[in-house]
Image (cartoon, rainbow, N blue to C red):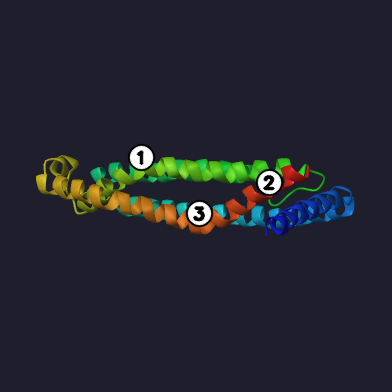
Amino acid sequence: MDNAKNQDIDLAVIWKKMAEEKFTNSKIEKQNIMDAIKLKSNDDIIQLKKRLGYKILWCLGFIIAFVIMLLLNMDKPDFLKVMSLFTLMYILAGISMYLKYRKMDFGIKENSNILDAMKYNLQSVKSALNIERIWGIFALPLAVPFGLLISKTSKGYSLQECFTDTRLITVALILIVVMVPILMIVTHKMNDHAYGKLIKNMEENIIRMETLG
C-alpha cells in the first residue's frame, strides 16, 4: 500500500515537472496566456472607470439639487449657511474623485507596459474609493445633524433656535448612533458589489503577469 502511495506521489511530481518544462519552453503558449490576461484586464479597467464615472455623476446630481435648493431659499440666511456647507462637502468629494478618474486610462494603451498599466489603473480606482471612504467617515456623522438643520432652517427657524432645542439635539444624537453605522455598512456593501469582483480580478491578473514575467 505504501509503495503504491509513493508511486502516486512520484508520478504527480513527474507530471508537474513535465508541465512546467513544457510551459517554460513554449513561448507561444506563454504569449497566448499574456494576451488573454491583457484582454480581460483591459475590459476590467474600462468597467472600473465607467463605474467610477457613474459615482461622480451621482455626486454631481446631488450638487445640482443642492444648488437649486439654495436658489429657492435665498431669503433664509441660516438655511443658506447650512446648505452651503453641505454642498461644499459634496463638491470637495466630487472634485477629489474626478481628479482620480481623469488619471485612469480607458483601457490599456497600445505599446504601454501591460503590468505597469494594470497596477497604475488599479491603484487609481482604489485611491478614489479610499477618498470616498475617508470622506464618509467625516461626512456621514455630520449628514444627520445637517439634515435636521436644513429641515428646520428651511421652515424659518434660526440656527440659534436649533442649537438651543434640546429635543432636536437628542434626536440628532440618537440618529447619529443608529444611522451612521447603517449608512457606512450600506455604502461598503454597494462599493463591494460594484467594484469588488473587478478589483479582485485585477489583483489576481497582476499576480499572474508577475509570475509569467
**Residue occupying the point 39% across, 51% down:** 67
- Of residues 161 and 5, the one nearer the viewer is 5
Q: Is residue 115 above or below residue 188?
A: above
> For the image shown, how many numbered marks are present on the structure?
3
Q: Name the residue under label 3.
A: 55
Q: What element carries label 2?
A: helix
Q: In this view, does 28 lie above or below 102?
A: below
Q: What residue type is labelled 2?
A: Ile
Query: Could you say where residue 141 lies in the image, as x and y percent from the top left?
Result: 30, 44
* Rendered image: mark on residue 138: 1
Q: Quadrant of the N terminus?
A: bottom right
Between circles 2 and 3, the one closer to the viewer is: 2
Q: Is mark 1 on a helix, strand or loop?
A: helix
Q: Which amino acid does label 3 sit on?
A: Lys
Q: Is residue 13 visible?
A: yes
Q: With 101 as the anchor, is 134 left or right in this view?
A: left
**Residue occupying the point 28% across, 52% down:** 179
Give me the C-alpha separation between circle 2 and circle 3.
25 Å
Q: In this view, does 120 lie above or below 152?
A: above
Q: What residue type is labelled 1?
A: Phe
Q: Mark 2 points at which residue?
A: 206
